[in-house]
Image (cartoon, rainbow, N blue to C red):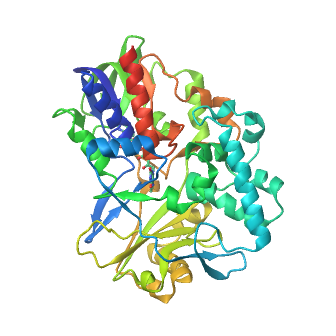
């Protein structure tokens, strides 16, 4: 049996942040990771000679915890390519180009979108994202789906579809009828306001040279040799008020504290002896992962740039609701161009029901509607596999079903005896983002050091 001060379960950014902060303060830590690598939802991989960021990749200016860590680790960033016009396909099926962040819709729709964005900004400004249940309208907003809330705000379907897009397919990756208006406000508040979510140049601002997975790799490298155990899925935690024994298929680890640095959905996959208190077990049955397929499509050249296009494309009515130029500007001599696109929620269900060749054809046809016929002939095509990966089972992150944020949210970050819970999915600022993972990791480490 290995005896340490703190056993950390999960070597994503959250777990590695906890371990780093505790190690720096002189605590003995061990990190147990189910996968054969560190990084969790961050993964930079070479696929047939194309380097891809399979999971998280973008850094935005509001993510100050991540920016500070990048600085601490000496990692550099570069801007996403964004020169030229963007593309929008409207409800009428017509493709239009535009500049700036406002979609080229009718004047009436544009006014409605602006009004709704202002209203969402107002609601988000009233919320501390760490305590959404304290919002003055929390009860009311948590009882109604975001889709129903939008329908109550405007009769303009294209305005609803566009505002719904920013939170539904693009962020929580669930249909807007399946999460509450309060969850939508939380998403906005966690990013510093709804206006940030609608501004792709803000929210998808920069990338890390070499890929965002360099963050967990660098954090792991700062721990003592042997502190991170790969291929060790935790199956059971036996606990008392004084400490816990953590069991994997390969060993057992005794700690005064245990940090479950895994998404809330995976907390429940571990057996606890004694069982977790009822509210803890109930709560996590009301949390689920969203579903989004992140697509990387690489071409011989970034042909859209020659057409005066930035590569940015949106349409609530397309299979691929958003797409961007994702060319690796940091790879010397790179002449190919890569587009990244997303297929979300019910559209992802339908796509996943098809065979791989049909899926690819449907995606390329959707891209061709944005960028023209050249989009039909890529040199490389890749779909991120998170929804079938047993140590994530979805993407990007998890969120509550309707009514549950007010019912259970306040228990999310409560410790149970020596057990603490942390992940980007239960963050306030940086919710569902790497920034939130760092904030949660730092908060848990500080709490343990205080005891
Ligand atoms: P994470 O899930 O990364 O880590 C948990 C770890 O626990 C995993 O390594 C898992 O294997 C391990 N584990 C689980 N159960 C275990 C058990 N029983 N025993 C041992 N280990 C166990 N964010 C962002 O900031 N910018 C972006 O652009 C994006 N984009 C994006 C795209 C895609 C496709 C995805 C999937 C995600 C993003 N994100 C993102 C979100 C971001 O990647 C995510 O919020 C953080 O990486 C989560 O870090 P955590 O450490 O909290 O969880």
**Would residue 58 appear left or right of 32 to someone viewing this image?**
right
Please name the residue shown 24% across and 33% down the image. Answer: 250
**Would residue 4 appear left or right of 355 to someone viewing this image?**
left
**Would residue 380 appear left or right of 433 to someone viewing this image?**
left
**Would residue 381 appear left or right of 151 to someone viewing this image?**
left
Above or below, 275 against 234 in this view is: above
Above or below, 175 against 84 in this view is: above
Which quarter shows the C terminus? top left
Please name the residue shown 41% across and 48% down the image. Answer: 390
Above or below, 426 against 364 in this view is: above
The image position of residue 362, as x and y in percent, is 53, 78
- Tell me if I can see residue 180 in this picture: no
The image position of residue 190, as x and y in percent, is 56, 43
Q: Nearer the viewer, residue 48 or 197?
A: 197
Please name the residue shown 22% across and 34% down the image. Answer: 223
Q: Nearer the viewer, residue 297 or 97?
A: 97
Residue lying farthest to the top in this orientation:
242
The image position of residue 398, as x and y in percent, is 54, 44
Residue lying farthest to the bottom in this orientation:
373
State how many labels appear: 0
Please name the residue shown 47% across and 47% down the image. Answer: 433
The image position of residue 124, as x and y in percent, is 66, 43
Which quarter shows the N terminus? top left
- Tell me if I can see residue 317 in this picture: yes
Q: Nearer the viewer, residue 293 or 209?
A: 209
């Amino acid at each position: 049996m290995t005896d340490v001060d703190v056993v950390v379960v999960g070597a994503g950014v959250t777990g590695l942040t906890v371990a780093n902060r505790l190690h720096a303060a002189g605590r003995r830590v061990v990190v147990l990771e189910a996968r054969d690598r560190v990084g969790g939802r961050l993964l930079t991989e070479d696929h047939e000679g194309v380097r891809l960021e399979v999971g998280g990749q973008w850094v935005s200016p509001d993510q100050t915890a991540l920016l500070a860590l990048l600085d601490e680790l000496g990692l550099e960033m570069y801007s996403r390519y964004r020169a030229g016009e963007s593309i929008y396909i409207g409800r009428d099926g017509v493709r239009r180009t535009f500049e700036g962040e406002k979609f080229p819709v009718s004047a009436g729709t544009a006014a409605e979108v602006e009004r709704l964005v202002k209203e969402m900004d107002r609601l988000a400004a009233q919320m501390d994202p760490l305590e959404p249940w304290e919002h003055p309208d929390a009860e009311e907003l948590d009882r109604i789906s975001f889709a129903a809330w939008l329908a109550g705000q405007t009769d303009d379907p294209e305005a609803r579809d566009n505002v719904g897009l920013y939170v539904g397919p693009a962020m929580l990756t669930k249909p807007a009828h399946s999460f509450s208006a309060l969850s939508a406000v939380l998403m906005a508040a966690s990013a510093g306001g709804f206006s940030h979510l609608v501004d792709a140049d803000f929210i998808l601002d920069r990338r890390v040279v070499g890929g965002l997975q360099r963050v967990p790799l660098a954090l792991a490298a700062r721990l003592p040799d042997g502190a991170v155990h790969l291929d060790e899925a935790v199956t059971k935690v036996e606990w008392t008020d004084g400490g816990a024994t953590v069991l994997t298929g390969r060993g057992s680890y005794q700690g005064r504290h245990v940090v479950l640095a895994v998404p809330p959905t995976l907390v429940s996959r571990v057996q606890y002896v004694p069982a977790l208190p009822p509210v803890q077990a109930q709560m996590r049955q009301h949390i689920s992962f969203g579903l989004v397929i992140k697509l990387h499509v690489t071409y011989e050249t970034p042909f859209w740039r020659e057409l005066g296009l930035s590569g940015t494309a949106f349409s609530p009515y397309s299979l691929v609701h958003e797409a961007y130029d994702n060319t690796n500007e940091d790879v010397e001599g790179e002449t190919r161009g890569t587009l990244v696109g997303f297929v979300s929620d019910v559209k992802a269900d339908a796509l996943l029901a098809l065979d791989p060749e049909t899926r690819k054809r449907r995606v390329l046809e959707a891209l061709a509607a944005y960028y023209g016929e050249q989009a039909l002939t890529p040199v490389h095509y890749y779909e991120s596999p998170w929804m079938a990966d047993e140590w994530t089972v979805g993407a990007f992150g998890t969120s509550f079903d309707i009514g549950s944020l007010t019912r259970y949210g306040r228990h999310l970050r409560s410790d149970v005896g020596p057990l603490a819970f942390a992940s980007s999915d239960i963050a306030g600022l940086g919710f569902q983002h790497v920034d939130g993972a760092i904030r949660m990791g730092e908060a848990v480490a500080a709490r343990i050091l205080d005891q």
